[in-house]
Image (spheres, rainbow, N blue to C red):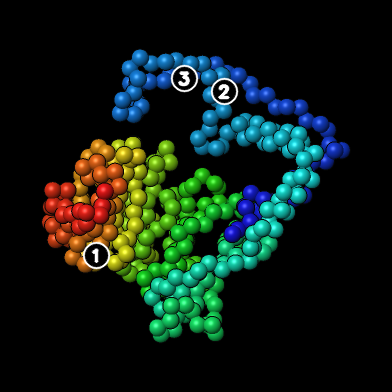
Amino acid sequence: FLVPRVFAAVPRAQFRFSRAMTKLAAPIARQEPREVIFGAVEGENRGSNPMKNVVKRNDPWFWLRDDDRKSEEILGHLRSENAFTEQEVAHLRPLMDKLYDEHISHLKETDDQAPYRSGDWFYYTRTVKGLSYKFHCRKPAGAGLHVPAEDASEQVLLDENKVAEGKPQCVVQGVRPCPDHKLLGYSVDFKGDETYAVRFLNLASDEYLPDQLDGVTGAVVWGTTSDWVFYRTQDEAKRSYKLWRHKMGQNQEEDVCLFTEADELFDVHHGKTKSGRFLVLESASTETTEAYVIDLEGGNDGQAVLIQAREFELRYDIEHLGESFLIWTNKDKAVNRRLMRVSVADVMAGKGGQESWVEVCKDCCG
């Protein structure tokens, strides 16, 4: 387990409030009348069935909303609230320190994650006592071994602690080697707004490539080679809605948009099948799924092919196996879902809809 970042990233001394300082008064936000409307508003997307009889309320603190997080007046007020809170809970600091120390005493701060094999390497992460972030490492695999050889030398691919140096906060995710294991891609967020920048490392030289992708949602997915990666971007509401293809060595401005989700109730997700042949693009709401596949072995201009068009309350996930796609679905309102399949040929011919799905395990699936 990792030491909680809320505590580990900030020295304890920073929390302490000096009694010699002038006692702070509680910051009171000014009130500014603002009418807020609940229900249908012309020109705005208020959902599929908004209230026709609108309700109006006065919100005198609406001015405290700042989606860009750039208003100095609002940021200053929040800083004042934080300072006042630290002052008021200063007498609890000894108890906080005691609870923190007790919590840490039950954690194994120096630990290794179980390694997983990919190609000729075993990849894993490890943590070190006193450090807030992970080390991403690998060891060479021996012939026929399911674990790294005891004398295998470790290669540290990425030290998140170095990435986080000098930053107010740091979240690293999606640390993934390319198919030939010569490059490493990872996403990092230094602001806390869940919008990431993607960096690429040459694992032989430990140098960064000039490629950098900004404004990305989560992790990138490599193609079948190290020449291409796929990533998503967000709209102004932080909704993941576009899928892009990037050619390594080119500027991000030259990237190709493969899919755009216009419906604000749906978010876009993507990932590769376990076979590595197909990229799965999923557009989903809380109740409905629509999935596409891109054949990564069919050339760099592969188009997204629809599996089943969105149908309210129909949900399904897909995986590739041999000449078929396996489909895990709630078709016909199956409470425990059903396992079905459809041929790859039918899907690529545009005939992969639910009318072509065949039950795999009728007696053992709900």
Q: Amino acid at mark 1?
A: Leu
Which residue sits at x=20%, y=47%?
308
Q: Earlier in the sequence, mark 2 or mark 3?
A: 3
* Location of mark 2 (residue): 61
Q: Earlier in the sequence, mark 2 or mark 1?
A: 2
Question: SS for tag 1?
Answer: strand
Q: Is residue 148 above or below residue 282?
A: below
Q: Amino acid at mark 2?
A: Trp
Q: Is residue 2 left or right of residue 345?
A: right
Q: Amino acid at mark 3?
A: Val
* Location of mark 1 (residue): 321
* Location of mark 3 (residue): 36
Marks 2 and 3 sit apart, C-alpha to C-alpha, by: 11 Å
Which residue sits at x=43%, y=81%?
145
* Quarter of the figure with the N terminus: bottom right
Q: Earlier in the sequence, mark 3 or mark 1?
A: 3
Question: SS for tag 3?
Answer: strand
Tell me the mark number nearer the camera, choosing from 3 and 1: 1
